[in-house]
Amino acid sequence: MSDEQNSVSDLLEDNQYKYGFTTDVESETFAKGLNEDVVRAISKKKNEPEFMLNFRLKAFAKWKTMKEPAWPNVHYPSIDFQNISYYSAPKKKKVLESLDEVDPEVMRTFEKLGIPLDEQKKLANVAVDAVFDSVSVATTHKKKLMEQGIIFCPISEALQDYPELVEEYLGTVVPVGDNYYAALNSAVFTDGSFVYIPPDTISPMEISTYFRINTEETGQFERTLIICAENSYVSYLEGCTAPQFDTNQLHAAVVELVTMDNAEIKYSTVQNWYAGDKETGKGGIYNFVTKRGKCAGDNSKISWTQVETGSAITWKYPSCILQGDNSSGEFYSVALTNGHMQADTGTKMIHIGKNTRSSIISKGISADHSSNSYRGQVRIGKNATNARNYSQCDSMLVGDKSSAHTFPYIETANSSVQVEHEAATSKISEDQLFYFESRGVSRENAIEAVISGFCKDVFKQLPMEFAVEAQKLLTLKLEDSVG
Amino acid sequence: MLEIKDLHAGVDGTEIVKGISLSVNKGEVHAIMGPNGSGKSTLAKILSGHPAYEATSGEIIFDGKNLLEMDAEERSLAGVFMGFQYPVEVPGVNNAEFLRMAHNARRVKAGEEEVDPLDFDELLSEKMKMLGMEKKYKERNLNDGFSGGEKKKNEILQMAILEPKLSLLDETDSGLDIDALRIVSEGVNKLRSENNALILITHYQRLLDYIKPDFVHVLSQGKIVKSGDKALAIELESQGYDWVTTAD
Ligand SMILES: Nc1ncnc2c1ncn2[C@@H]1O[C@H](COP(=O)(O)OP(=O)(O)OP(=O)(O)O)[C@@H](O)[C@H]1O
Ligand SMILES: [Mg+2]
């Protein structure tokens, strides 16, 4: 990726939330509220095949019987699901043939975000799908990918063009009734990305999606489905931003990954949703996300890397079901909380096949009044002979008003397994920063050095430019908090 | 080079330094001695710009600049170096990388290009050799798990890399074994020139055998109660502090 190509981003020159702008586009937004008619209307609006409507209705019926989970270590006033609009799309009259037809205001928004969609920048080696509120507005590099049989398009389009593929895999990793937010997503999702890598194919470029919530009081429910067939590989990047509003907005995404024999998916996220006012905690995104991958094939691998720096509340556990023999799952996470943010994040590694391996590296950084919890589960089934897990969960506290918590759960039903868990807590202190300064090193560079040292094992999993940006993002967020 | 005029300073509203005046010229070595708790480290921290310590009155002029108006980073870049009595540990930050950051901050300030890790390694190896430091300290994290003596050596290594105009070494000798004291002292002597100056805070005459001071000051209860030449240090060694601190 080149510089302009990015992302998370060079726009971050000051400590304000730089993405806090809204875009004035005419949009078509459903009235607030949720009932079966709304679910039907979404499906109709998108001209979906029948199986999709049934999927949604089943999910909605489930959701109605479920309760919001109370176990996460986060606190917020209960959400009024009737006070949210479940569909908001930039108004368009016809199907767009090229990017030139996208509303220039929408294009400008993505420019401000540093996401290049226009043709000239297409030379850079990243394919981008941009989701604006609920609707995918542009997917680049489609043709080039198609030459190798790789499908990369909005999921709404996949439902039109490849309905049988979607039907075969959707909901197979995260069932409609998996959890409260996943059920809600399954009922009302409006768009997201779809990727299919055919057998024996190494994706020639990184595939990337940017999500942005623009309209006040809309929820964003995207759905991502990535299928990587035998002997194939793809690296997928996800970036998220939102404007600043006083009211909290709900983001409840579902991501499903499937790998066949010898296939590998590497999924990286840099999440910087608006976190709410730093002093009062007002506003901000509620980020309730279900991400799960299934290593269906033998020797397959799924690797999650996340850098979580935003959202008022994060509730997220990218997980791996290690079904194929010799399959492996990895989870690398940096979660930063500051201001009044609350994060309860971690992973689940479910070992089913023989010789399955998982490793978990989690780095939590908490500053100001924030609360940061790691919650991880390692479950080893009775047939998972010789399964192994290694977990390392480190916390760093900045200042003395923040808190860090670690909740590891380990269950093993097979005696041949090896499970290792390490945890450590450290502090970034004023004396450390003074030490750097007394050597002529700026405070900013000092924080960056300490943080990148702490996060090294995670950052090295990210594509280079993403790592650099992620590091800058963390440094900027912490500058005011150390002391 | 350095002119301290009637400096009063302290921490959290408690006055610790109670009217110190001191003038240091290029090429000079000053030693500051004095009982525990007399304010030596506090004076050093004030000079280096520690944010927790506050000067309430008086002046510090360094190279014609008002030091008290500069923050720690600016003071360092202007050529003031402090060798800490208790250097902090910074886990996760590689020692060599830290030294390179500090070195590059100097270079950027001077309008020069930053050096890359390879070129820096040459400079670093040379300085480490001079101080008899093993290569492994490049790989270690900054002071992390270093022994007392290793931390002190690492401070002098930083001084060697940064080549400051004025160095304040706060009890660099304590913690060093006999051989290390000699090697480090020789290293410090090599770094001396007509253009720089040294303030040594120490409890022991033996450091001053290696690095010969031009002036020796005795600090007691936040004031310089006696100044003299090297002979004063020898006298203190045999007689203790009572005769100077209770003189009035
Ligand atoms: N941050 C602080 N908070 C409270 N008191 C302090 C602080 N820093 C220094 N002092 C007090 O100020 C006095 C002088 O301390 P300082 O460290 O300057 O002494 P020193 O001359 O360097 O002693 P030593 O020879 O033991 O190193 C001591 O009584 C010490 O307890
Ligand atoms: Mg002291």
Image (cartoon, coloured by chain):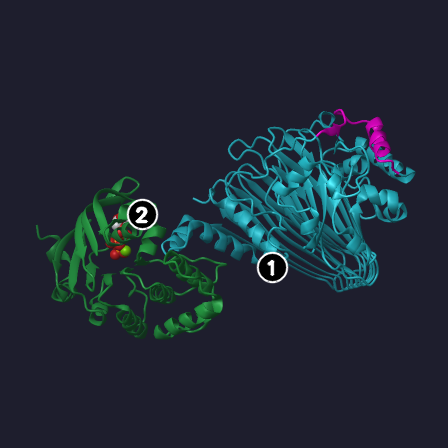
Chain colours: A cyan, B green
Q: Are marks 2 and 1 on the same chain?
A: no
Mark carried by residue A460: 1
Q: Position of residue A293 (x, y in %)?
A: 76, 52
Q: Is residue A49 above or below residue A202?
A: above
Direction from residue B126 to residue A394 in the image, left or right: right
Q: Quadrant of residue A99?
A: top right
Direction from residue B47 to residue A372 in the image, left or right: right
Three-letter residue code for mark 1? Lys
Determine whether the residue tagged by mark 2 lies in a helix, strand or loop.
Answer: loop
Which residue is found at the position 90% from the left and 39% from the top?
Answer: A49
User: In the rendered image, is residue B34 in sight?
Assistant: yes
Which residue carries the number 2 mark?
A: B70
User: In the rendered image, is residue B202 in sight?
Assistant: no
Mark carried by residue A304: none
Q: Chain of mark 2?
A: B
Real-space CA distance between mark 2 and mark 1, rounded to the nearest whole angstrom? 37 Å
Q: Residues within 10 Å of mark 2 (few under 14, many from 20)?
A: some
In the foreground, B154 or A397: B154
Q: Which residues are magenta?
A: A26-48
Q: Quadrant of residue A252?
A: top right
Direction from residue A39 to residue A246 in the image, left or right: left
Q: Position of residue B241 (x, y in %)?
A: 15, 58
